[in-house]
Image (cartoon, rainbow, N blue to C red):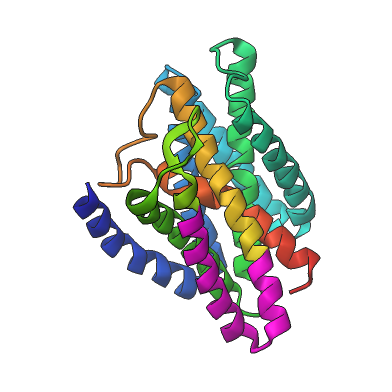
Amino acid sequence: MLKARLISAAILVPLVVYGVLRLPTSVFALILGAVLVAGSWEWARLVPLQQQVLRLLYCAVVAVLLWLTWVAGPVQLIVPMLVVACIWWMFALYWISHPQLCSSRAVACTGFKLLVGLLVCVPPWTALVVLHLRAENGPLLALILLVMVWLADSGAYFAGRLWGRHKLAPLVSPGKTREGVYGGLVASLLFAGGAGWYLSHSLTWTATFVAVSLLAMLFSVAGDLLESLMKRQSGIKDSGSIIPGHGGIFDRVDSLVAAAPVFLSGFLWLKL
């Protein structure tokens, strides 16, 4: 399992780094959109939608919403998108702490989870595209965010295996520990400090950047737990199996979809 995880990472990470730094934003947006549309297939499976035709229809809805956002202009729509995303993720914290909510397969619960799938696909895509579009260090900032999320995830995985004792949310994800979260936060924030200093050579700017990154990484944990909650309620272990050692696409982007809108919100609000 660990060997497959490392091999997949060794192949995918250089491709992602090259794509984020070298591709124009239009191509970056297209590839990211394709990833999230594929992820929406997995989300529909977690809802669960049993019929494949309904899953395809749901993917088409996500694709159309992303396309309409691009046509209307991500920059013009970013403020309402971020407001909606931040309100949603605050509610997600409540849902995670009350995992019995919407645990049935009633029509209302299915409809709610389908709506949630739109909220975890469209605003993060918009946030990452707008971040990539920034005239000053846009692609680099997008890559820094991705690396912080990777470090938070990997740090939590290894710290949890080495020192994990206290369960973080046993009713949602019994394998996750507080020690793992702390390890992931330390890894990502050390990197954020170095990245902030590289970008600004200012202690004040760097400290503010680290604070914004800390908030984003805390919400990345919420994204991870939300997918765990969806999997537990549907009785499915992994969202998919497309990436050896990592599971499905949503197993890799669950933290990012929560972190991206929070990161950009803090970045814009503090005028970094």
**Magenta run includes residue 196:** yes
Report the magenta stretch's main SS: helix
Residue 194 seen in render: yes
Please tell me which residue lies in front, 137 or 227: 227
Image location (x, y in percent) of residue 246: 32, 46
Q: Specify the farthest residue to the top.
A: 106
Give the total of numbered labels.
0
Quadrant assignment, res 200? bottom right
Which residue occupies 58% across, 10% down?
A: 106
In this rendering, position of residue 190 left or right of residue 108? left
148 lies above or below 43 = below
43 lies above or below 5 = above
Which residue occupies 39% across, 55% down?
A: 159
95 lies above or below 63 = above
Quadrant for the C terminus in the image: bottom right
Which residue occupies 58% across, 24% down?
A: 99
Q: Specify the farthest residue to the bottom.
A: 201
**Magenta run includes residue 261:** no
Image location (x, y in percent) of residue 84: 75, 43
Which residue occupies 37% across, 52% down?
A: 163
In this rendering, position of residue 1 left or right of residue 36? left
Residue 135 seen in render: no
Image location (x, y in percent) of residue 62: 57, 38
Read off the magenta span. 182-211
Please tell me which residue lies in front, 49 or 179: 179
